[in-house]
Image: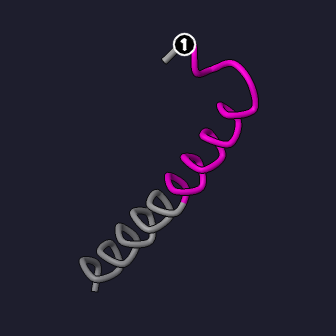
Amino acid sequence: MATSAIGPAFLTQTAVFTAQFTASFAFAILLSILIDIGASN
């Protein structure tokens, strides 16, 4: 894994991973907020 951290390939890999992670993370936050609202009502 350390060897793949050299060069532009690592940057694109990180960018793709970050985009996917951000999307799923935002979805998880949105979901927890909706559950929070539903529980308080």
Residue 6 among magenta residues: yes
Left or right of residue 38: residue 15: right
Left or right of residue 27: residue 13: right
Closer to the camera in the image, 38 or 10: 10
Q: Is residue 33 depicted above or below 10 in this figure? A: below
The percent coordinates of residue 10 (x first, y second) are 65, 31
Which residue type does callout 1 highlight? Ala
| SS majority, magenta | helix
Q: Is residue 10 depicted above or below 38 in this figure? A: above
Closer to the camera in the image, 14 or 7: 7
Q: What stretch of residues is rendered in magenta?
A: 3-22
**Residue that appears at 67% across and 34% down:** 9
- Residue that carries the numbered disc 1 in the rendered image: 2
Closer to the camera in the image, 27 or 32: 27
Left or right of residue 6: residue 30: left
Crowd band around label 1 with a 10 angstrom C-alpha radius: few (<14), some (14–19), many (20+): few
Q: Is residue 4 depicted above or below 38 in this figure? A: above
Closer to the camera in the image, 29 or 8: 8
The percent coordinates of residue 4 (x first, y second) are 58, 21
The percent coordinates of residue 14 (x first, y second) are 62, 39
Question: The residue tagged with tag 1: helix, strand or loop?
Answer: loop
**Residue that appears at 44% across and 63% down:** 29
Q: Quadrant of the C terminus?
A: bottom left
**Residue that appears at 52% across and 63% down:** 23
**Residue that appears at 59% across and 55% down:** 19
Residue 38 among magenta residues: no
**Most extreme residue toward the right, as rendered?**
8
**Total of numbered circles in the picture?**
1
